[in-house]
Amino acid sequence: MGQAPALKLHDFRILMAATFFASITHGENVILGWVILELTDSPFMVGLAMGIRHAPAFFLGMTAGTIADLIDRRKLMRSLLVLSTLVALILGLLLASERAQLWHLLLIPAIAGTISMMFNTTQQSFVFDLVGRQYGLNGMSYLSLAMRGGGMIGALAVGFALAKSGPGTGYFVIAVACCVSFALLGLIRSRGQSAPVGTSNMRTGFSEFWKELRDNRTILALVLVVVLVELFGFTSIVLMPSIARDVWNLGPGGLGILSAFSSGGGIAAVALISMLGQVRNQGFSFIVVIHLFGGALLLLGFAPSIYIAVIAIVILSGMMALSDLFSQTLMQKLVPNNLRGRAMGAWTSAVGTAPIGNLEIGALASLFGITIALALHGTALIILAVVTLITFHKLRGI
């Protein structure tokens, strides 16, 4: 089928387009981070807000994965987009009318985070339904490419709207993007593969996957590594508003541009993997990515100029994208077809530990400065890569 077998499938191409528009919602991080930083002047409060937004992933990840295994995945995604549109409109109206209070900015994004988590878990399981296990990495690569592209456009569009018209307009942009994604998903013919008849309720769904976890130690090892990468790597995102404003004296437009560079790095990395087709030794590649991830954090922390900082951000985002890509693909390769949704639920719960890291890195930055916070996290990731390489032999051999 060549190097891009997934792109030959009509339904998968539609899913990519829908994912692109749905991912414009990631621009919410630009709005939320900037508004709360301006309101409180505290990196810790930004970390708290981001932590609350992502907390549902930890508590509800397995529930979302089980639901994705039990019902029509296409209909579930469309229903979630309707809810995303409503939430974006509510926040947009509150901000545009200047009635938004701090508790609004903490509570309502948590609802948006829950919806986004369920959508991502479902669509990642849906990819394997459409392209099959053999071309899973290829499909996940192109899906990630669509997500990163949408995230980049979202960051630019929302950053521009924030600078020119205020944060309310940014949320209206997000609402329109959700509507477009909803319409596109209606063009997909496949319903996806739900769990077999024997898995008919939530309790059975949970017990089946916990048994798989007990029997497959490699999955447990992968989940543990993903948790630590999330805690020490991805949480650096919450410092982006402070890096833009306090380190490089940039406004909201500048923050949007930095966020776009971040998405661009992810796009470049995933595009490279997409062009390569299938990658051998995906477990070892994942470990190498973790090492480079740590190095990029150190480079960003000690960047002597904004140009070096941009290079570090591009590398950092590339490693974030590849870390997600390899860990998601490995997770789905390690389980039977009927457990894919729950496997992604476990992965989602693992990345749902981010609120702990968000609070921790926000506190570090407030107490000791941004440089120290990034340096400590970068060093921790490098140590994790070395320990994983030495300890988890089966994981590195996949």
Image (cartoon, helix red, strand yellow):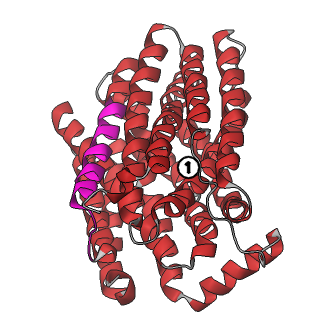
Viewer-proximal residue among 223 and 181 = 181
Q: Is residue 14 left or right of residue 389?
A: right
Q: Is residue 256 left or right of residue 118?
A: left
Residue at (28%, 77%) from the top-left corner?
Answer: 281
Image quadrant in which the N terminus is located = bottom left
Viewer-proximal residue among 70 and 250 = 70
Disc 1 packing (10 Å; few <14; some 14–19; many ≥20) = many
Residue at (38%, 66%) from the top-left corner?
Answer: 135
Please tell me whether mark 1 sits on a helix, a strand or a loop: helix
- State whether the magenta stretch is mostly helix, strand or loop: helix
Q: Is residue 174 left or right of residue 68?
A: left
Residue 91, by quadrant, is: top right
For the question of whether residue 251 can be seen, the reply is no
Viewer-proximal residue among 39 and 368 = 39
The x, y position of residue 152, in whole percent, is 38, 33
Look at the image and say whether residue 279 sits in the magenta stretch: yes
For disc 1, the marked residue is: 359
Image quadrant in which the C terminus is located = bottom left
339 in relation to 103, above or below? below
257 in relation to 57, above or below? above
* Magenta-drawn segment: 258-280
Direction bottom: furthest residue: 215
The x, y position of residue 355, in whole percent, is 58, 52
What amino acid type should be assigned to the residue bearing mark 1?
A: Leu
The x, y position of residue 309, in whole percent, is 23, 38
Residue at (25%, 43%) from the top-left corner?
Answer: 314
387 in relation to 246, above or below? below
**Callout count:** 1
Look at the image and say whether residue 386 sits in the magenta stretch: no
The x, y position of residue 368, in whole percent, is 40, 46
Residue at (43%, 21%) from the top-left corner?
Answer: 157
